[in-house]
Structures are given as structure tokens and as C-alpha cells.
Amino acid sequence: MTTVTKNVKISGVGMHLGLPVNMVIKPSQKPGIFFRRIDLPNSELIPATFDNVCDTMMRSTQIGKKNGASVRTIEHLMAVLFVLGIDSAVIEIDGPEVPFLDGSAFELYRLLEKFVSDKTKMRKIVVKKTVEVKSADLIKTLPFWQRIKAAIFSRRITTDGFVKIAPYDKGLLIDAILDYNNKIIGTQSYSYMFDGSKSSVKDFVDNVAKSRSFGGYAEWEWCKKHGMGLGCNLHNVIAVNARWDATMNKLYYPDEFVRHKIIDAVGDMFTSGGFIYGWLQSYKGSHALNNLVLRKLFSDKSNYEIIEPKGAKK
Ligand SMILES: [Zn+2]
């Protein structure tokens, strides 16, 4: 089990509400990543696990109870905890959203990297069989009002997207593809492999961590009028113009769009509660598909095998 060496306080504003939020990542003695909403009375620990994800529609992963104690936009923090090997922590937070900071994983990484306890191996989740989910299946499972919401927030509903997870024995390999009928993104792909080595951590920090999420500027204006995306600005989100042929701020990489998908996927895969040894292929993927593929993976014991690290209590 690996935790943090001291309380790490991180403050900022949330992506959607834009309100100040303080988060303290605390050392813990028990396995797992847990959040606690300290602004709510008697708030219990909220496990950051796939089966506790209550919403994925607002371009973020939300855990907890939809109309109760929940925390939104956990994915970038989860990605950073994963690459740092931190699999045990209690995260106290005084608002409903994780601080958005630079909109990527980079700042969170820099704030946390010096406070990692002696590393031990994580629980391994070895994928034994290929499991696949498609956007079309996902949309069918949504209630009517959520389909409408998905249409608004995803710009359009794509039905040919999929996320697939297949056996792979060297670590977590992620292949992400974006395929948009526009000039600025078009078709972009990126591959990242994490095997727990220092070089794979460095690869994440150097080539993936800084990338930000994106949105159309017109959509952004609409969201702000409706009280969403209030924490977004031209430093922490890539804003694309109305014709979708140019960005309004400078990109870190021409394919920054798809690199950000890697952060989201790494974070979402860590809601498995361990280190997935598998090959994740994501075509027009989303938080919703990432969550659905984990639900499908864990729905059948023959799909995976859990290997606890030596000396760990089950
Ligand atoms: Zn993201």
C-alpha cells in the first residue's frame, strides 16, 4: 500500500461551478482512494470506485450519490495518484468538485510528487478476456432526459464509438483515437503504456500530463450562461472557434486533444481499485464508456484475475 507522507492541501476552483474549493489529501491506513465532503454534515467516505460512479454526462466522472454527497471531476487527480502509485488516501474536500487548476494533470502531479510514501506494489487486475462496449449500447441505457443532456454536452451523439479492454501482460496500454469531421481535430491517435517503471512515469509527465480538455467556444458561452464551465478559462481549456478550424489559445501539442483522452482514461481505469494489466482501446471514447467497460469487465469473474500484492490483507 502506498499513501501520502503528509496532508497535502490543494486549493482552486471547480470546473463547472467555478467556486473556490479546498482539498486535503491525507495519509490513510486502509487500501483505496476515498473522498469525504467535509462541507456536508455527517458525510461518509465515498469510495472512488467504478461501481460508485453516479454520473459521467458532464464531461467528467462523478462519484457518490447523485443528489447526495458526491464529488465531480475526479479523473485527473485519479490519473496522478495512479502514476505516482498512491493506492491509499482519504481526500477531504469542502465542495462538490475537485479543483480544476491548469485543466490537466500536470499541476496536480507537481503538487503531489514529493509526498509519496515508500512504494509498494499495487493490487493487479489482470484482464483475461476481451470486453467491449459501444456508444450505441450506452445511449440505449440512458433515460430520455439524459439522452438530451448527452446530445447537448457531447455536441452530437456518436454511435460508432467504442471502448474495448483486452489481455495485455506488460501493464496498462492505452490506445486512444479521436475522429471528428472537422479541421482542427480530424483524426488523432495516441498510445501510452504504463508499466510502473520510472520511464513510464516520465513519459506521462513529459508527453501526456500537460494536455487539456477542449470545447467549442460557442458551447462554452452557452454553458456559462447556464451556470456550467464557470471555472474554465483560456489557460485551462482548449477553446475551439465556431468553425472548428482553429483554437483560440495556443496548443501544447497539435494532438493535445487526444493526449488529454489518455489522462481521462488512466484516471477512469484507476476506479477499478487497482493496476489494470490490459490493453484499452478507445475510439471516440468517453467517461461513460470507460465506466461501462469496467462494469462489464467486473460483471463476470472469468474476465479478470485479481492478484493481491504479497503481504496484503484481502
Ligand atoms: Zn479530462
Image: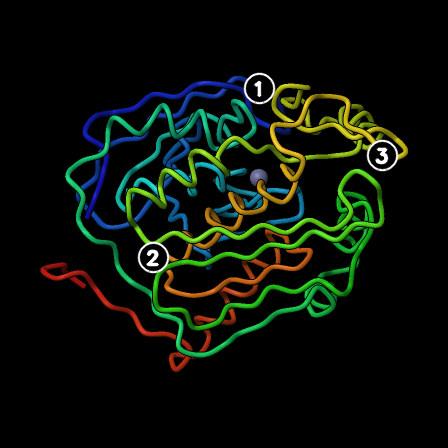
> Distance between the Cα atoms at labels 2 and 3?
38 Å
Which mark identifies residue 164? none
| Quarter occupied by the C terminus | bottom left
The crowding category of the residue bearing disc 3, from other C-alpha atoms within 10 Å (few below 14, some 14 to 19, many at least 20), is few
Above or below, 34 against 144 in this view is: above
Q: Earlier in the sequence, mark 1 or mark 3?
A: 1
Which mark identifies residue 275? 2
Q: Is residue 257 left or right of residue 239?
A: left
Mark 3 lies on residue: 245
Q: Residue at x 43, y 42 (%)?
A: 79
Q: Is residue 215 left or right of residue 255?
A: right
Q: Position of residue 237 (x, y in %)?
A: 65, 27
The amino acid type found where label 1 is placed reads: Leu
Mark 1 lies on residue: 19
> Distance between the Cα atoms at labels 1 and 3?
32 Å
- Along the line of sight, which residue is nearer the eye, 260 or 60? 260
Question: Which element carries disc 3, helix, strand or loop?
Answer: loop
Closer to us: mark 1 or mark 3?
3
Q: Position of residue 92 (x, y in %)?
A: 35, 30
